[in-house]
Image (cartoon, grey):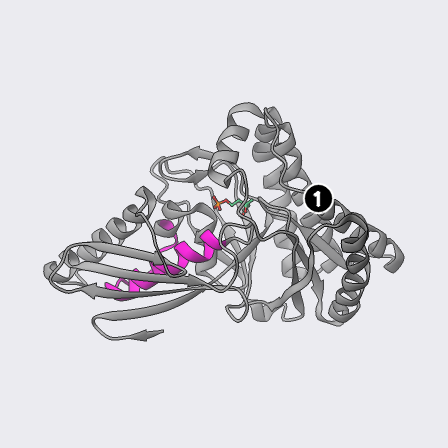
Amino acid sequence: MAENTRTVTCEAPVNIAVIKYWGKSNEELIIPLNDSISVTLSTEHLRARTTIRSNSGSREITFSLDGKEEVLTKRFLRAVELCRAEAKRQNTSTAEELAQGLSIVSENNFPTAAGLASSAAGFACLVTALKHYYRITGDVSGIVRQGSGSACRSVFGGFVRWLKGTAPDGSDSIAQQVKPASHWPEMRVLILVVSDHKKETSSTHGMKTTAETSRLLKYRADVLVPQRCAEMTAAITAKNFAEFAEITMRDSNQFHAVCLDTYPPIFYLNSVSQAIIEMVHIYNQYKGTPTVAYSFDAGPNAFLFTLEDNVNEVAGLISATFSEMIDFRGLPLQPIRTEASLA
Ligand code: PMV
């Protein structure tokens, strides 16, 4: 981060949930129905970058994303307001600074809104940049959460848990690091971009419809996820990849099952995603133990977790399997878009 009193630039990474967040108990404050756990990637391959400059002589806030001027959303403005309020509370900026307009310029080095957690990196980056711009100290994950829920997990590196909390105002719904990346440096993520088109059902709309119509979601959030979070934390702590992989795959499948249980149903996976799932199970069977795990968010792209020793074999297998598939089914799959390590 480069900083002077007038310009701040930050970079923030993407995080991939291995226990998924899906459904809110409070729409306005973005309080989730269940805890979730994620892995933060390094900023080397997938990252948002945001620069904030003061708009001298103006009170206006402008925002551009990937070179395009954007309309300021309610959530965006709320993030700015919450940071200003916190700076005022901590007395870290002058009244003049807090009133001054801002020019905010962001760019992602990957397709926006294609199920690659771009809003997660984007909001974590925006709020972290504002934090440094207004010289706020302490944890800002609660502010990030109110911009884009899953983004609060991108505030920390390594393995991160977002607590649903118990306070009605969401004040204890914050992110906490379970373990730093250095705890399990062999962990790797391969990202298979099946489609870089903007997703059809946004996660905000999707999870609202699921919460309103799926009975399965309640059981998942109240009973299954709490058990799973405990098991996942134990697997990460013990660096037990087989356990980590099985829980990750089961949770991804269950998330897509509640999407299917939504009425009308939501389909995020396509036939290429399904072929990837089959391939991973066949490969794991051949290896005799879970060696690769898949996870899919609100889109068809696959995140494959494996340990460093297997990266080349898995990457080779994917290229071999899916180059044929492109010819056979005519589906657009760019085999390995990027290999990312943890932050
Ligand atoms: O925070 P949102 O609104 O982008 O929702 C994210 C939802 C999932 O990516 C599907 C799951 C998760 O926990 O990241």
Helix or strand or loop: what does disc 1 sit on?
Answer: helix
Relative horizontal placement of residue 152, taking residue 192 as reference (left or right)? left
User: In the rendered view, would you say 113 is above or below 320?
Assistant: above
Residue placed under numbered mark 1 in the picture: 250
Front-most of 114 and 22?
114
Query: Can you give x and y, in whole percent of width and height, for residue 169 in the image?
Result: 33, 38
Q: Quadrant of residue 269?
A: top right
Query: Can you give x and y, in whole percent of width and height, for residue 168 in the image?
Result: 36, 35
Query: Can you give x and y, in whole percent of width and height, for residue 149 in the image?
Result: 44, 46
**Residue under the point 53% across and 47% down:** 198
CB at disc 1 and ligand 1 closer than 8 Å: no
Q: Quadrant of the N terminus?
A: bottom left
Query: Can you give x and y, in whole percent of width and height, for residue 295 in the image?
Result: 66, 50
**Residue under the point 46% across and 42% down:** 164
Which residues are drawn in magenta?
Answer: 118-142
Residue 54 seen in this snapshot: yes
- Count neighbours of disc 1 (C-alpha within 10 A) and say few if under 14, some if 14 to 19, many if 20 or more: some
Front-most of 292 and 331?
331
